[in-house]
Amino acid sequence: MVMNELEGIYAIWLREVKIYFREKERFVASVVSPLLWIFGFGAGLGATVAIAGVNYQTYVFPGIMVMTVLFTSVFYGLYVIWDRKLDFLKEVMVSPLSRRWVFVGKMLGGVSDAFIQSMVLFIIALVLQIPLTPAGFVASLVVIFLTAACMTSIGLFFGAILSSMESFQLVSNFVVWPLFLFSGALFPISNLPSWLQVLTFIDPLTYAVDALRGTMLGTGVFSFGLDAGVLMVFCVLAIGIGSWAFERMGKL
Amino acid sequence: MINTSKLTKKFGDFTAVDKLGLDVAKGEVFGLLGPNGAGKTTTISMLITLVEPTSGTATVNGFDIVTQKSDVRKSIGIVFQEPSVDDLLTGRENLEMHAKLYCMPREIRKKRIREALELVELTERADSFVKTYSGGMRRRLELARGLLHRPKVMFLDEPTLGLDPQTREHIWMFIRKLNKEEKMTILLTTHYMEEADTLCDRIGVIDSGKIRVLGTPKELKRAIGGDTVVIRKKGFDRKKLRGLSFVKSIAQNGSETILGVQDAHSNLQKLLARIGPIDSVEVREASLTDVFLKYTGKKFRDEGEDGGEGGWGNRVMHQSNVRG
Ligand SMILES: Nc1ncnc2c1ncn2[C@@H]1O[C@H](COP(=O)(O)OP(=O)(O)O)[C@@H](O)[C@H]1O
Ligand SMILES: [Mg+2]
């Protein structure tokens, strides 16, 4: 039985990865936007600003990495709304593979997309001469995996409970941008006003950004264990509500 | 193979399917015939475990659609109303994904995919992206996919919607093949009279979520009185027809009065004598269209012409029965 389910999960994952490579526009768009941030925003501000002794462009790099994963993952999940409109998802939803595993397959597809994108960014990191050690690289991958799994699950959750395409805008404004802005991706979180500090503490991405600053630049505030642990908790929660939403789909 | 009892689906206050009762026997091709919005897709969605009914029960292949979803899903194949094959995959990749989802063992997967592609005559295009397929080819691919895991029951939701007449004939041929050669029980929905007439062993006419009448195409046609007489006359007074036992039904469609008449050829004289001067008269054998008009009170236009989904106008008829 378990073998069969793995095969079903693999089928869904494989489809997602194929689609990712075949939809060139999606791929190009997802690579261009982090480049703009790094070379437009990072280099622009970096010309006058340095934080914690490093050039701003380098400082902001882990934040841009997290942002890329965030946007790719959440919007990947939200895409389910579109799939549902086209009767496309129905084929999967009425197959004997249980909804929970459909969710897992989809989630792994999103994680893969985010991984592929982050590879592009790692190459840029080399160009920018960011001092990444092999151990730091592996640790970064763990962080990216957890972040992508969490964010894809959140996206899939909203994709499953919302039905109109306008929801994209809502989720973008009320979920994606706040998650990004309050994560400290663009600034250090140590000297913030207390209301902002509270928000950053409950934002899972804060820990992702901090962990990557640790693994890539060696300037993390919390220990890697703490960051990874908190991320893992968020991840489990997100997977929980996401698969719950998938199982519930259709009961309305 | 399919049994429903008081199957009901509400969306808020709106009842899309209303206490539906159906009984589809093994090996049967059953047609749900009804206009857009009648509740056909909603009915299918419940039977294939995509949405749960608000109340009522149903079984498919002996399994309950709410409590035994997984068994139901293993028993059925589906062709959805909207295209549901993946554009960015090839035809073969679509089938492979399906085979994996249905846990088909690797050894038989390849063989079945080849057979299914042959059956729907897509072997040559199997490795092209689906986005390069025509509407008819997509439909055929969906049929191939639906039958890949040899389901006991096949659900086809408007299988020929939007296809040109030749492609439609083609699809019909495959549906007959599935039923005869693969021994599949088939439930299909359609709003094309001709489709229901040529394909289905039995038809249920559905409107506003309710089955209005149910029977073989022959029975249905016979039940409305055999022939149809259409009379155009200003100020038609239906009281004049009282006592004519061969007039089985009367329906009004704008300026036309549509009569269901037994043996119209020998009774026409008597009928016209009773009515008096008219503008015009037309006699034809009863068609499913007349059955439809009678039971749903709906008029359709251009049926089978454009293959589009227009075709059903508003409720323009006031119908009544005359008992002989
Ligand atoms: N998810 C939904 N929410 C609200 N109303 C719906 C929904 N799905 C279908 N309906 C309504 O239910 C009725 C029946 O729809 P449907 O089953 O698709 O009809 P058909 O397939 O016969 O054309 C329609 O009036 C449609 O607008
Ligand atoms: Mg429909």
Image (cartoon, coloured by chain):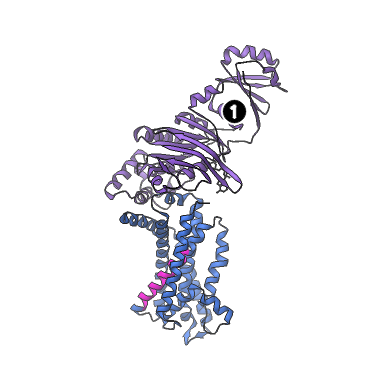
Chain colours: A blue, B purple
Does residue A145 show up magenta in the picture?
yes
* Residue at x 60% of width, y 13% of height: B267
**Picture residue at 64% right of the left edge, 12% below the top:** B270
Q: Which residue is mark 1?
A: B294
| Image location (x, y in percent) of residue B214 | 51, 30
Q: Position of residue B238 (x, y in %)?
A: 69, 21
Q: Nearer the viewer, residue A43 or B170?
A: B170
**Chain bearing mark 1:** B
Q: Quadrant of the C terminus of chain B?
A: top right
Q: Residue at x 54, y 74 (%)?
A: A181
- The span picked out in magenta is A136-153
Task: Quadrant for the N terminus of chain B, please.
Answer: top left
Residue B286 among those drawn in magenta: no
Q: Mark 1, residues whose alpha carbon is within 10 Å: few (<14), some, or many (≥20)?
A: many
Q: Residue furthest bottom?
A: A53
The location of residue B141, given as percent across then percent down, is 40, 43
- Depicted A164 relative to depicted B23: above or below: below
The answer to whether residue A119 is left or right of residue B164 is: left
Query: Element at badge 1?
Result: helix
- Which one is nearer the viewer's eye here, A231 or A215? A231
- Quarter of the image holding residue B172? top left
Q: Amino acid at mark 1?
A: Lys
Q: Would residue B164 be seen by someone viewing this image from the given angle?
A: no
